[in-house]
Image: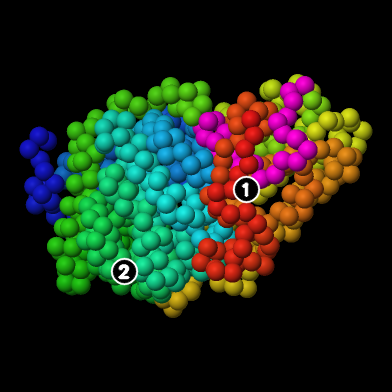
Amino acid sequence: MTDVTPERLLARMTLDQKVGQMTQPERMHITPDEVRQYHIGSVLSGGGSFPGDNRPADWVAMNDAFWEASMSEEDGGIAIPLLYGVDAIHGNNNVVGATIFPHNIGLGAARDPELIERIAAVTAKEILATGVDWTFAPTLAVVRNVRWGRTYESYGEDAAVVASYAGRFVTGLQAGYGPDGVLGCAKHWVGDGGTTDGIDQGDTDVSEETLDAVHVNPYRPAIKAGVGAVMASFNSWNGDKCHGSHYLLTTKLREHLGFEGLIVSDWNGTDQLAADFVESIALGANAGIDLFMMPEKWKELIEALKQLVRDGIVPEDRIDDAVLRILRVKFAMGLFHAPRPADRPWSNSETFGSAEHRAVAREAVRKSLVLMKNEGAALPLARQANIIVAGKNAHDRGHQCGGFTVAWQGQSGNEVIEGGTSIWEGIHAVAPHAVLSPDGSACDDGNFDVAVVVIGERPYAEGMGDIRGVETVVEPGSGPGIVPGAPTERLEPYAESLEHAVNHPEDLATIRRIAEKGIPIVTVLVSGRPLVVNPEMSASDAFVAAWLPGSEGAGVADVLFGDHAFRGRLSFSWPASADQNPSREDAMYVPAFPVGYGLGIG
Ligand code: GLC
């Protein structure tokens, strides 16, 4: 393959082979033989979609089969290595036993771009351990309303904080497209974090000046760092769906920002462009989509693209442009010279989920914690104290990892998060007299010096994490940008209020049960966003925002006992009341705590 170039390869390709390269089915809806037969360029795992027992060896075997099929030259086939994509957004989070990092909201509070580059480098190695070569990360959303169910995927509401991470993450992840790197994907282009009322896939109604300064801003360092892919966003901008906007995808991203990689659609993202499927494909292709993430309807996509070219609705040179971009990325990554996944240096590596990797995640947990209140010197804790550890999130590694962890929506319990430590396990490892009592009932007849109460949210992802009224738009893609008749699905919101005591009254009940005994209380909030927690905070002597710390919950104990200082700073402003519209766009929004707030001790 020494003399092969993307251009020479393209010149040999049939229309079938070209549109096959532009097609990305989901693994559950295609076989390796169909990858060969239809010349498929990429396959993905949706959140929680895994092979076999969900161990690295299962993933490597699956990728070997897909790769072999893509390299087949049977029946005139052309060997073009397949790209396998996953949402490894806080470690290789689909896979059991992976190192799970804090979600981005916590990393934003750490204000540590150097750490971000190390996290990305470890993540790349744990992705490569499974034979995968592409992750749909970093998320560069600049979230302006914390009601959005994807707030935790964002580094913050300040574009400058997100931009300070964007390039470093790409550099750590792609590693110069060497053997230690995987393909990154900056997402979601553009304005995903700016929708009105934080409605998922809603409408971002801002001037182009604001779009540039807030939402486009972080893509510049990502592109400068060489990110090879960008994912189009479900939201609309002033009523125009991003997936169908030639201005946003081609003029702005390619011509103005100079992006030369491939643009991938989001999950059936073009469906929302038109009631008619073929028309929606035409709109997406002509706007600038190169690779269609079409989990199930991939055969219909292939037929539609061929028909559209035959009918002259999608020019073949647009197809050639898309295929050339895909091939150039694969060449740049060295995929054409890489051996089968099983024979690559990091496949099935012992470093997957290793102590060395977990130490980086534990450091990130420490640096992400924000001390919001500390009265009566409740902190730091003493190791020999009699400590009651309460709250539903005290011993639940699933809750501390949040969404996009093994399952798309995440899950409760400890079993599924193999390796790592719950917050309780971290405390108990250093405090021999600590007692776990999730509802706090041990305080009824116990004699305790201090309580740690770990409260917060249960896991969620995407629109199912939104906080919105059920009566308001509940269908993704709703709002001015939705095309009548285009398919949408109804997603129930997480809650209607930002008031935590309304959504989870059990937490305030636990705090109050202990407070009645006169025991000082350190409350730790495990959540994907700032919440209105006025009664919970008032009843606490100390209050810590821990965000979604991931698998290494012991990092919380490292700071609670003073081994490491609190250094986290809010990357989101904190709402004072539930009736506020917590949005930076709202001039009347006066938060309880501003961006940058955080106390320090130790
Ligand atoms: C989802 C998300 C996107 C993710 C993709 C593949 O709908 O919007 O962030 O990368 O589908 O799982």
Is-magenta flag for residue 375? yes
Residue situated in front as seen by the camera: 254 or 410 = 254
Tell me the tag on residue 245: 2
Tell me the tag on residue 160: none
Query: Separation of disc 1 and disc 2 at Cα?
Result: 34 Å
Under tag 2, what secondary structure? loop
User: For the point 25% across and 51% down, which residue is it?
Assistant: 261
User: For the point 7% across and 38% down, which residue is it?
Assistant: 3
Q: Name the amino acid type tagged 2.
A: Ser
Is the residue indicated by label 1 positioned so its CB lies within 8 Å of ligand 1? no
From this view, report whether residue 3 is shown above or below residue 467. Answer: above
Residue 574 pos. (x, y %)? 61, 55
Under tag 1, what secondary structure? loop
User: For the point 55% across and 69% down, which residue is it?
Assistant: 587
Is-magenta flag for residue 330? no
Say which quarter of the image contains residue 253: bottom left
Tell me the tag on residue 527: 1
- Of badges 1 and 2, nearer the viewer stands 1
Say which quarter of the image contains residue 70: top left
Say which quarter of the image contains residue 428: top right
Q: Name the amino acid type tagged 1.
A: Ser
The answer to whether 569 appears left or right of 296 in the picture is: right
Q: Earlier in the sequence, mark 1 or mark 2?
A: 2
Mark 2 is surrounded, within 10 Å at the Cα level, by few (under 14), some (14 to 19) or many (20 or more) other residues, namely: many
Magenta residues span 361-384
The answer to whether 144 appears left or right of 386 in the picture is: left
From this view, report whether residue 213 is shown above or below residue 115. Answer: below
User: For the point 49% across and 55% down, which residue is it?
Assistant: 157
Is the residue indicated by label 2 positioned so its CB lies within 8 Å of ligand 1? no
Residue 324 pos. (x, y %)? 17, 52
